[in-house]
Image (tube, rainbow, N blue to C red):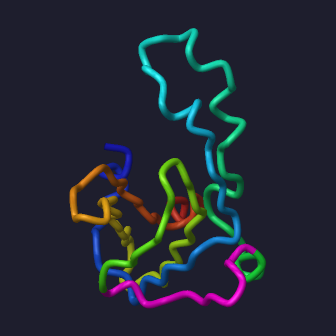
Amino acid sequence: RELAKHNLIFAEPKSVLVAEGRERILVPRRVWDVNPKDKRALQIPANKYRLSHLGPLPPEYVDHLIAPRTKPMEFDKPQDLELLPGEMQHTMVIVEPSDEDRTAHVIEVEHTTSDGRKIGGLTLVFVPPPNWFERK
């Protein structure tokens, strides 16, 4: 609804790159193997294991956060990340916007198991910077 007020159109970006991040953590089994309805079971604050550097990043900082010996890859096919149970890895999505005016870009990320079973996902919406909406 918020985007509809600005009469945005949705278009494919010029390119989408994905890079594995440097930050990779393994959450202890006692944290992720509890009944979520049992509030007493989770003794460790959930945010203790949250990955840092969420949100937009300055371009000069991206190289610092990419895992050693890796580089951004063109996102034209599924990218496999080999993770252990309970493991999380920071992932960067780099979008080059299209040249079209009043445009937003939507990228869908799907999480699957090694045998192809869908287990979740997320939708990323890239909109122009806030001051862009002030233009006439």
The magenta segment: 65-76
Residue 91, quarter of the rendered image: bottom right
- When the figure is inspected, residue 58 is found, relative to residue 39, above or below; the finding is below
Q: Is residue 113 left or right of residue 18?
A: left
Q: Main secondary structure of the magenta part?
A: loop
Residue 9, quarter of the rendered image: bottom left
Q: Is residue 94 left or right of residue 16?
A: right
The one nearer the camera, 73 or 14, is 73
Where is residue 20 shown, x and y percent of the image?
58, 75
Residue at 34% x, 54% y is 121
The one nearer the camera, 40 or 4, is 40
Where is residue 66 shown, x and y percent of the image?
68, 78
User: Residue 66 lies in magenta, yes or no?
Assistant: yes
Where is residue 15 shown, x and y percent of the image?
41, 88
Where is residue 95 shown, x and y percent of the image?
48, 79
User: Residue 124 lies in magenta, yes or no?
Assistant: no
The one nearer the camera, 130 or 106, is 106
Residue at 52% x, 48% y is 86
* Residue 30 shows in the view: yes
Circle count: 0
Residue at 41% x, 60% y is 124
Q: Quadrant of the N terminus?
A: top left
The one nearer the camera, 21 or 38, is 38
